Amino acid sequence: MQNNLKVLLVASEAAPFIKSGGLGDVIGSLPKALRAKGVDVRVVIPRYLSIKNEAMYGVEFLGEFDVHLQWRVQTAKILVKKGDVPIYFIENNNYFGRGGMYGHGDDNERFGFYCKAVLDMLAMLDFYPDIIHCNDWQTGPVCMYLKEVYSKMVSYSKIKSIFTIHNLQYQGNFEPATVDMLGVPACYGNGGAEFYGCASYMKMGLHYADCVTTVSEAYAREIQTPEFGYGMEGILYSRRDSLYGILNGIDYSMNDPVTDPRIVKNFSPEILEGKRENKRALQEWLRLEPRDVPVISMITRLADQKGFDILTQVIDEMMRRDIQFVLLGTGERWLEHIFDHLGSAYAGRFSSNIFFDEALAQQIYASSDMFLMPSRFEPCGLGQMFSLRYGTVPIVRKTGGLADTITHYNPETKQGNGFVFETYDGNGLLWAVDQALHTYHMGWEEWSNVVRNAMYCDYSWESSAGKYITLYNKLKSGGKTGNSK
């Protein structure tokens, strides 16, 4: 093992067991990259009812214990799925034996229980990591408990914590009495949890963690400003010397167009004909007109963050171009209705798929010509990384991780892996789309330059996992973490 380094990744979701978005993908792939570099890394998530039984095949029961939250006493059952990266599950039917992961009226209690159970689990396992790596608001209380309570115990006293922000917009803000329920009222009065009259789980992570990371360098800078800080910019600026931007990656072994069994025809940057075959198959499946026309796709949550306010302003104008458009995703009902209507209005040219399907998503990545991400903000974004991997050229707004991964294609220099606009408005979006369409219509030789540039990018976990390991070792040794933005 690397310097005998022991890391516990704590999160509310992890692929392939359960995920709602990029967080689940990251927790499913980062540990594999860390383990490949010799880290003793383990993962813990709640055991939700909605985790499919087949995913739990081979899971073993390790034991149980009571968790106390004020007058509440609930039992935590600990399960493990062994492997190169052990996955622990914390089971409690009262809190997690119900539909969905988030959005329940007692989420403060559910995730307070989970966070305390995570720390109590370590004693039961006799596994005390060097680093507890927490992710998003659902895990913020782990950092608080570790500093305010558990660090006073010898076995826990040397454990360091990292808190990673995957999306600052979601903060876990609850009524102030939440800190009494957690049993640590002092964390409210000392500023560790108080946030504009609420008790904030996100604030706990930002305040108590030994260092804070987020998922791209650009986003680390952006969240220190009022525009992107969602009220947390002050504490983030105060922690700027221990705030890191480390870009997420994707699992390149699972997402390889050369070997992927989920797509119709495999292909490579050197042999791109297979991509055209995938496109023809997608058109047939989605009842799009079977002809050589640029296919623009989006695979996303239907949420304001993703740029739908500016897209809906210009979508009819965009459809006046000779294009086909494919959407896959669910989200806000008003957006679902709009895209259902567009699917009917542009039959044969617009495919609106208001659901989510992993197999269809993979085929869309492999088949489309362009991938649209006009986000208002984007902490990292994984969609552009998947699309690059499969030679589907991104059209993005210059923000967060999109700014860190996509560069505008220049036909003269042949450099660039996508098309980028800066101003957040419909005109900017249309300009970038038109730039991509112009390049496409310059002919296959020109367009294949962009496609190959995209496919030759490397956004695997190799580099980023190394950055995390450097940070883990600095914290373990007690050295100053410095600043990597």
Image (cartoon, rainbow, N blue to C red):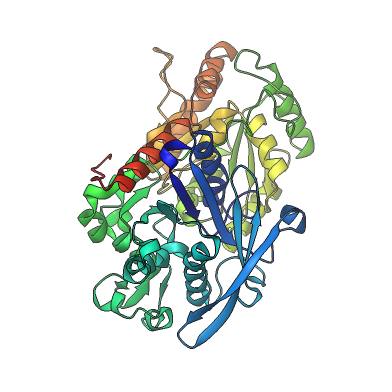
Looking at the image, the residue that sits furthest to the bottom is 71
- Seen at 67% across and 72% down, the residue is 97
Q: Which of the two residues, 483 or 255, is positioned nearer the viewer here? A: 483
Up-down relation of residue 294 to residue 197 (above or below): above
Looking at the rendering, which quadrant does residue 181 occupy?
bottom left
Up-down relation of residue 198 to residue 278 (above or below): below
- Seen at 71% across and 49% down, the residue is 344
Task: Count up the numbered dots.
Answer: 0
In x, y percent, where is residue 96? Answer: 62, 71
The C terminus lies in which quarter of the figure? Answer: top left
Answer whether residue 70 is visible to the viewer in this image.
yes
In x, y percent, where is residue 439? Answer: 50, 20
In x, y percent, where is residue 176? Answer: 36, 81
Q: Which of the two residues, 210 or 326, is positioned nearer the viewer here? A: 210
In x, y percent, where is residue 471? Answer: 34, 42
Answer whether residue 247 is visible to the viewer in this image.
no
| Horizontal side, residue 152 vs residue 303: left or right | left
